[in-house]
Amino acid sequence: MTSEKRRLSNEPEPEPEPNVRRSSPRKRVKSPSNGAEKTVMDIMAAIYFDINCVCAFRRMINSNSEDIAEDIANIHHWYRLQCDRASEFIGGAAALMLNQARPFPDNSDDRIRQILFRAGWMIFAMCAYSDAFRRACVEANEEIWDMLVENIVDNVCSIEVFARSRALDWRGPLLTLTRYNLPVLHAVLAPANRLSDEHFHHYVRTSEDKLRYPHFDGYVQTHISRCRFDSWDWPEADQVHPQTRQENDHDCDLCEQPECTCTLAPLAGYLVELFQYPIKGVGVRALANFKNGDILDEYVGELLPGGGDGDDIYALEFRVSEETYYDPVKISPKQFGNWTRFMNHSCKPSTEFHKMVVGNSVMIVVRAIRDISFGDEITVDYGEYYWQDKDYSCQCGEDNCKYSGNR
């Protein structure tokens, strides 16, 4: 969405370049065969998914939540199992590089050396937490492997930010190797900013692989997971929560019951990144595969009375009930919202806004209207009303662009 992309005075300096050998020569890969490219994209999506699962289980263990008390033993067992497998894999790579042992199948030795040289120890340690990555090192054919290496190298900054912002313990296995003569590890383990101190959607990755905060109208944009409601913003002192389901609304769209306690689990929130696209600005890049019809997340922001001015960029209006006497509600995420507010417009979008009843709430969600693959930009059609009286044109670049001559 449009705004001037300038760095704020209170915004931190961009993150340093990841500790990888970016100057390493790029290997020439043959044109992919049928299905090879999709297989590689599936492996890339699985790497991010596996890393996110490990981090999610760690958060569960540290939360001491009573909601998972019955499952905590199984969660802890699975988490330790993944950590042990990652440590063993990383330790095997160190032994290989030191010529102490050959813990991998013969065809994997060169692959381990190759990925360490091309991507570096930090990225290798992060990917080692993924079962999909470990299996690819051993099982993938040559064509798949060569393409996978190029994709990992192209995404080193993305993988680093993804893992660090979710507090993956990638340092632990590497720290156990410092007793060996591997000087490169000292640089990899040098102190760095703790990206996990803030929500991972507080970071925008630029095309130069630097980080900055998202901002609009001079304010840093803050992540929230649910819509914010303040009765002081409404004319009626006894205003109930504007998203409350009314008696005449239909049943819950999830369970099809008139009364329930259903909630919407955000499908995509953990598996997307904010990326600054050339020309279009900040947008959303998929780090997983999503299917047509998937509900990706709720469109959240501050709930305000409909109508009026104040946010003609992000605001979205809807009626909680189909009854006309209910006033429209405005969702304004210009300062407080989640990743959905950063979706760029496209005249050939991959998602749409859709009203749903979930539990006791009426909400606007983002629903996929076609399959979305790893690496795709997630887009939505802002609608004709948005483009009225705008002094800029659509930059989606689609052949069927409807607003490129808007200016």
Image (spheres, rainbow, N blue to C red):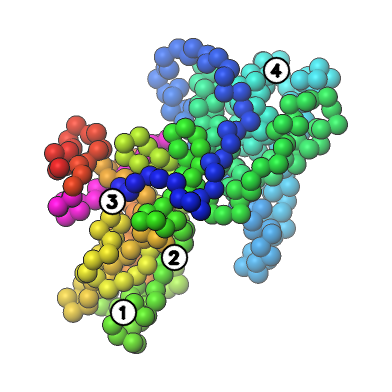
Q: Give the x, y percent position of residue 169.
A: 69, 44
Does residue 62 appear left or right of residue 266 in this picture? Answer: right
Identity of the amino acid at label 1? Trp
Identity of the amino acid at label 4? Asp
Q: Are marks 3 and 2 in contact (CB under 8 Å)?
A: no
Choose mark 3 or mark 2, whichever is in front.
Answer: 2
Number of residues whose C-alpha sits closer than 10 Å to that of mark 1, classed few (under 14), some (14–19) or many (20 or more) = some
Identity of the amino acid at label 3? Glu
Identity of the amino acid at label 2? Arg
Residue at 52% over, 22% down: 150
Mark 3 and mark 2 lie on one chain; the one further toward the N terminus is: 2
Choose mark 1 or mark 3, whichever is in front.
Answer: 1
Q: Secondary structure beneath disc 1?
A: loop
Measured in 3D between alpha carbons, the distance from the residue under mark 2 to the one under mark 1, in whole angstroms, is 18 Å
Q: Secondary structure beneath disc 3?
A: strand
Observer-nearest residue: 286 or 37? 286
Number of residues whose C-alpha sits closer than 10 Å to that of mark 4, classed few (under 14), some (14–19) or many (20 or more) = some
Circle 2 residue: 226
Circle 4 residue: 109
Residue at 67% over, 15% down: 110
Mark 1 and mark 4 lie on one chain; the one further toward the N terminus is: 4
